[in-house]
Amino acid sequence: MKQKIINIIPFLILIIFSSYYIHKRIKLDGLGVPMIQSDAQIKYYQLIQYSEGGLQNHKCLYPGKNIDPDYRFFPFDYTWAVKGEGKTFREECVFQYPYFFALASIPIYSLFGVFGLTWVCLFLYLVTSFIVLGYIEKIVGLKSVLFRSLLAVIVISGYPIYSAYEYTETTLAVILVLVFLFYILDQSSASPKFSRKPVIGLLLGFVASIAPYFRSEMFIYLFLAGALYLVLNSFQIFPLIRKNRFTLIGFLIGIAFFAVWNQIEFGNIFGVRGRISLGDLSGSGIGRQLVLIKSFFLGDSEKLGFLKAGGLLVVLGLVSLLYPRFKNFPTHSLEIVFWSIFGILSVIIVSILSPYNPGGLFAGLRFTDVSFYCLVITAAYFLYHLENFDSFGFKKGFLVFAGIILISQVYLQSRLLKSFFPLMNRVQESQVQLLNIWKEGEKENLPVIHKNLFDALLISVSYLNQYHFLAINEKEANDLQDILYKNDFPGFHLFWYDGEKPYDNNSSKKLYDEKINNRYEFPARHYQLVSDRTELGYRIQRYRKIGEK
């Protein structure tokens, strides 16, 4: 009985962490506003767009289109929305986030509302942690409770935690790819532990095929995994296909099905996001890519570097490849070679081929969430083989080394986690404070005019409750005021960040100068200034129609 309790300690660790994360989610939601901002808000608008207008309603949701039908003062631009004839997808304005993710979110939104969208991401993240630990125990077969406990802490507290607190397709795409890889590798083994029923293989393959349409980098992961597995199996293509034929058939049917669907809806098999990503990659200069790669691995003033967040796991992965060179150690298994090479190579290739800056702090690493879990599995296989090696004298040193690496990784992650939640609290509290200011004008139907795109990061759910417009220069400000005056608006809020905006590598120099870091003196026309204040570095001015109180 005592041994059984000891054996479930790793899962108890996951339960404790899960309870803590759920508590934090409840606390964030207790502020009364869902934590949906930045690119997550665009995905939310897409969801509303399709749930209310139908599955073929691809035109950008824009509450202000009744007075701005040409989308001239639309508050979003590239990389969130694609506008203009040069990049049309049968519509003059299209949000460029994954179409199928918006469709998959509709049932969640219908049942649980907007707060359910963020809760399901946390749920998927926690499920992924349990699946990975279950794989380590049942498939890898690691027995040491100490090492399993350390790996449990690493799995559930690593940098993928960021995706759990954002409305994002990442958590769903990651779990689909991991389960698909687990199943394929298991079915190719001498003694599979998962069911070999054809219907399960077909269904799993079909469901997993949507992952690349959620996130483009999943194409890289799946292609790399397939190529690597063929190489490690000496290109025995037909025996591998025979073992996995039903799963592969389901996967190929799914890839073709979703490609045709995209072609019908958007005139391109990759959809909006995929096509834009390919275009951005081909048009990205070497200098810009080097800057993105450097900031990904080393970090910068805004984001966490991969070497700090996951570098120790890479070290352990490299050691797992090299340890058979030491005297008396057995040759490594195919599993160690696959997971270590796959984990390390995927980090490198995804970072090289990504044309985007993925965001600040933890968000800067979200393209490689799958790699993180693969490196944890590599560590588990390495420890398993050390456990089962007879020569204690040689393996002792490696066990101590592995233990130091894992404890150090736990320490680093605990420090990063300690900074993560206070940051989330500050961001959410700031957003709520700004939304409450705008909300003061809702009853009077006061629109919000933004002077630059940087301000659009925090529009959030306010977008659905009141008008938001963008005027990037004096001429646009004058023309917009004329429109508001003709439509009998009693006033408006003018909103802008009153400091230097950080340069975003996702934008061109032209876009940054004209629409992000632009500055101009607002020319009051038909309206007069009645209040002016600064909150959290943002200027909020209130204007009233001249002659009205």
Image (cartoon, helix red, strand yellow):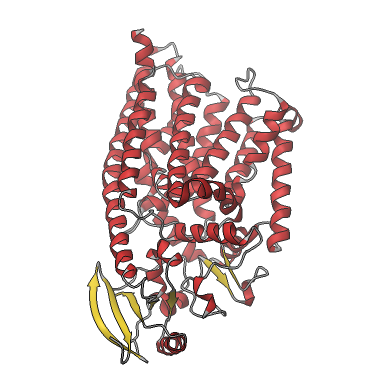
Residue 234 shows in this picture: no
Say if 348 sits above or below 269 in the image: above
Say if 80 sits above or below 385 in the image: below
Q: Quadrant of the C terminus?
A: bottom left
Q: Quadrant of the N terminus?
A: top left
Residue at 23%, 73% in the rendered image = 534
In the figure, is residue 279 to the left or right of 544? right
Closest to the observer, 423 or 368: 423
Residue 33 falls in image quadrant: bottom left
Can you give x and y, in whole percent of width and height, for residue 481 in the image?
A: 42, 87
Can you give x and y, in whole percent of width and height, for residue 308 in the image?
A: 34, 45
Residue 163 shows in this picture: yes
Closest to the observer, 365 or 330: 365
Residue at 39%, 47% in the rendered image = 165
Image label count: 0
Can you give x and y, in whole percent of width and height, for residue 173 in the image?
A: 54, 44
Residue at 59%, 45% in the rendered image = 211
As drawn, the residue found furthest toward the top would be 1
Can you give x and y, in whole percent of width and height, for residue 11 in the image?
A: 39, 24
In the figure, is residue 106 to the left or right of 288? right
Say if 222 sits above or below 398 in the image: below
Residue 184 falls in image quadrant: top right
Residue at 70%, 24% in the rendered image = 197
Closest to the observer, 317 or 134: 134
Closest to the observer, 186 or 194: 194
